[in-house]
Amino acid sequence: MNTATPPVDPRSMKSFAEFYPFYLSEHSNRTCRRLHFVGSTLALLCLMAALMRGQPVFLLYGLLCGYGFAWVGHFGFEKNKPASFKRPLFSFMADWVMYKDLWTGKIPF
């Protein structure tokens, strides 16, 4: 008898409130969460640099930092595929909620 639960398809989730717990379950590895945090922080710094210097290329650097660190966390440590491949908007929103939750201690860093 197969007792394994079938994989959850994030595309079936209709609301962010339904998606966020799934998103957190895809980030159970502490190193993965830390890499997300570093990538998000660097992305914010790149956004600030783009605004302060008037150089839009820093927006590209921010995307590379944010997604690059996150994907290393998923493929290298979490051993799963990022949810952004199936629910990009919810994933982007969830990353910033998780970032806030890491800052406030709601999720262990």
Image (tube, rainbow, N blue to C red):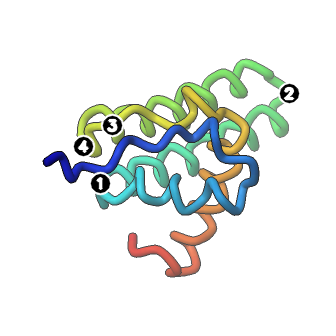
- Asked which quadrant contains residue 20, the reply is bottom right
Total tally of numbered discs in the picture: 4
Q: Where does the image place residue 40, in percent across and percent down from the top left?
A: 57, 47
- Label 1 environment density (alpha carbons within 10 Å; few <14, some 14–19, many ≥20): some
Most distant residue in the left direction: 1
Q: Where does the image place residue 83, in percent across and percent down from the top left?
A: 52, 37
Can you tell which mark lies on residue 80? 3
Q: Which residue is mark 2?
A: 54
Q: Which residue is mark 1?
A: 31
Q: Which residue is mark 4?
A: 77
Task: Measure the alpha-carbon separation of dots 3 and 1.
Answer: 13 Å
**Could you tell whether 20 is left or right of 59 in the image?**
left
From where the camera sits, is residue 41 visible? yes
Callout 1 touching callout 4 (CB < 8 Å): yes
- Label 4 environment density (alpha carbons within 10 Å; few <14, some 14–19, many ≥20): some
Task: Measure the alpha-carbon separation of dots 3 and 4.
Answer: 8 Å
**Relative vertical location of residue 71 with respect to residue 13 in this rendering, above or below:** above
Task: Measure the alpha-carbon separation of dots 1 and 4.
Answer: 7 Å
- SS for callout 3: loop
Viewer-nearest of discs 3 and 4: 3
Q: Tell me the residue at 39%/48% (across/down).
A: 35
Task: Measure the alpha-carbon separation of dots 3 and 2.
Answer: 37 Å
Q: Amino acid at mark 4?
A: Phe
